Amino acid sequence: MLTRLRALLLAIALALTCEMSAAAADAIALPAFSSQPAGSTVSGWSAYTLGGKAAPADFRLAELEGLTVLRVEASNAASALIHARRFDPLATPWLNWRWRADVLPTAGRFATRDGDDYALRVYVLFDLDLSKLSFGSRTKIRLARTFYGEQIPTAVLCYVWDTRAAPGSRAWSAYTDRVRMIAVDGAGSPTGSWRDVSRNLVEDFREAFGEGPPAVTGIVVASDSDNTGGQTLGYFGDLSVTARSPLQPPP
């Protein structure tokens, strides 16, 4: 059975073959949830269920506090929405979003296989040159690409709202050292209220992989509770990519 991560990478490969674009600007437009009617099908993002046996999580556009947002609920389930978009993070390094976690997986444990469940995740996919990887990593990725396509990413940042880990905690995924986990929110973060996030992709990539980042090839939002069999509920607001952080004052 495919692991959840391999299934996600397969979905990304399929999405990237359908929608690839390059951009060089002060901001990269990502499809906004707030511009779509509540109750309609999500536009601009491709849906995918994570894991071979996992039930799909419930992703839907809903009105909350007068705005359309993405409501995500998982009951022993896992799903993702993928937006394939190629851009240079050196030109636009800031990934910005709003999220709100109302129900966290009680048995979730950061960067462990048994506890690998999160009410909210944001993945960023990078096109790292295979020649920079170890022989073992190159062999694994080439084998995966033989079966799932050339667009399998070689490096991933995964931002999560964790149940127990302190905000700022970092670790490698329990499944692969090609995915860097970062607990943006966690122990002490207030549930039931919106949190504004702005992450510098260049700094986070350099911390994880020891060098500047290559091109980004896609953004993923996800929710899962299938490893612990629990319940989660959360919301995503709009995401954006910018040259400057909106949380920092202008120069």
Image: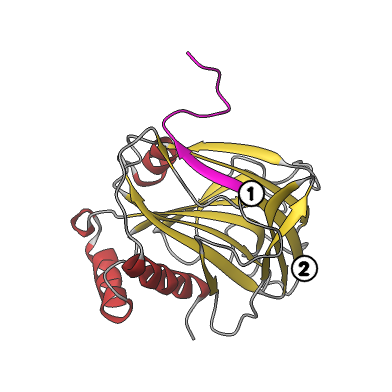
Residue ID at (59%, 70%) = 79
Dot 2 or dot 1: first in sequence order is 1
Colour scheme: secondary structure
Q: Position of residue 135 (x, y in %)?
A: 22, 64
Residue extending furthest toward the left: 131
Q: Position of residue 70 (x, y in %)?
A: 66, 57
Q: Is residue 244 magenta?
A: yes
Q: Position of residue 101 (x, y in %)?
A: 74, 52
Residue ID at (40%, 68%) = 15
The residue type indicated by label 2 comes to: Gln
Residue 249 position (above or below residue 13):
above
Q: Of tags 2 and 1, which is closer to the observer?
A: 1
Q: Is residue 37 magenta?
A: no
Lateral position of residue 227 relative to residue 26, left or right? right
Is 93 or 226 nearer to us in this picture?
Answer: 93
Crowd band around label 2 with a 10 angstrom C-alpha radius: few (<14), some (14–19), many (20+) = many
Residue ID at (42%, 69%) = 9
Q: Secondary structure at mark 1?
A: loop
The residue wearing badge 2 is: 231
Is 129 or 247 nearer to us in this picture?
Answer: 247
Q: Secondary structure at mark 2?
A: strand
Residue ID at (54%, 53%) = 122
Is 232 or 241 nearer to us in this picture?
Answer: 241
The residue type indicated by label 1 comes to: Ser
Q: Position of residue 124 (x, y in %)?
A: 45, 52
Using the numbered discs, state the Cα–Cα distance from disc 2 to disc 1 in whole angstroms: 25 Å
Q: Residue 34 has which mark?
A: 1
The main secondary structure of the magenta stretch is loop
Tell me where the magenta segment starts and ends, as one range: 238-251
Is 196 or 23 nearer to us in this picture?
Answer: 23
Lateral position of residue 133 relative to residue 38, left or right? left
Residue 175 position (above or below residue 100):
below
